Image (cartoon, grey):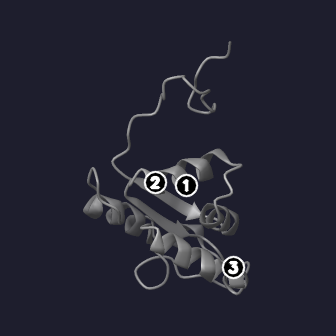
Amino acid sequence: MRGSHRWDYRLPGQPDVWPNPDAVVVAPATFNTINQWALGITDKWLVGVVAEGIGKNIPMAMMPCVNRAYVAHPQFERSIDTLQSAGVQVLYGEGGFIPNEPGQGNPAAYPWWAALDAVANNRGPTSIV
């Protein structure tokens, strides 16, 4: 029998090795992660955790890291709207992540502080941000 590790899925009936989170930050969130999360496609471990987090009322903040070409795809705005309506604090635009032209991103300029501040200011045992 396999051991239970943080990188393994747990089997039904096995204890959860993760502590209950005070909050979750999803950053940098890719185009794929954002759309899968909004659509409920949980074939990736991370997406499964945050999809379930919505139902568990875990305060969550998400900040994309996408370029303007991805933002132009019609599914992107639908996914942003879906996550916001589910209670996820989306840090996109002024005060969060502002998309750049394809190939022009600067990793050092990613506003990590915005994502961390969002959950630090809004966490609570039953709140949704």
Q: Are marks 2 and 3 in contact (CB under 8 Å)?
A: no
**Of helix, strand and loop, which one carries label 2?**
helix
Q: Report which quarter residue 77 is drawn in.
A: bottom right
Q: Which residue is mark 2?
A: 55
Q: Percent position (x, y) of residue 64?
A: 56, 70
Q: Nearer the viewer, mark 2 or mark 3?
A: 2
Q: Nearer the viewer, mark 1 or mark 2?
A: 2
Query: Label 3 amino acid?
Result: Gln
Q: Is residue 104 visible?
A: no
How busy is the neighbourhood of tag 3: few (under 14 within 10 Å), some, or many (20 plus)? some
Displayed quadrant of residue 35:
bottom right
Separation (CA) of disc 1 from disc 3: 18 Å
- Which amino acid type corresponds to the residue marked 1 in the rendered image? Ala
Q: Is residue 122 visible?
A: yes
> Quarter of the image containing the N terminus?
top right
Is 117 in front, or is 85? 85
> Mark 2 or mark 3, which has the lower sequence index?
2
Q: Closer to the camera, 104 or 10?
A: 10
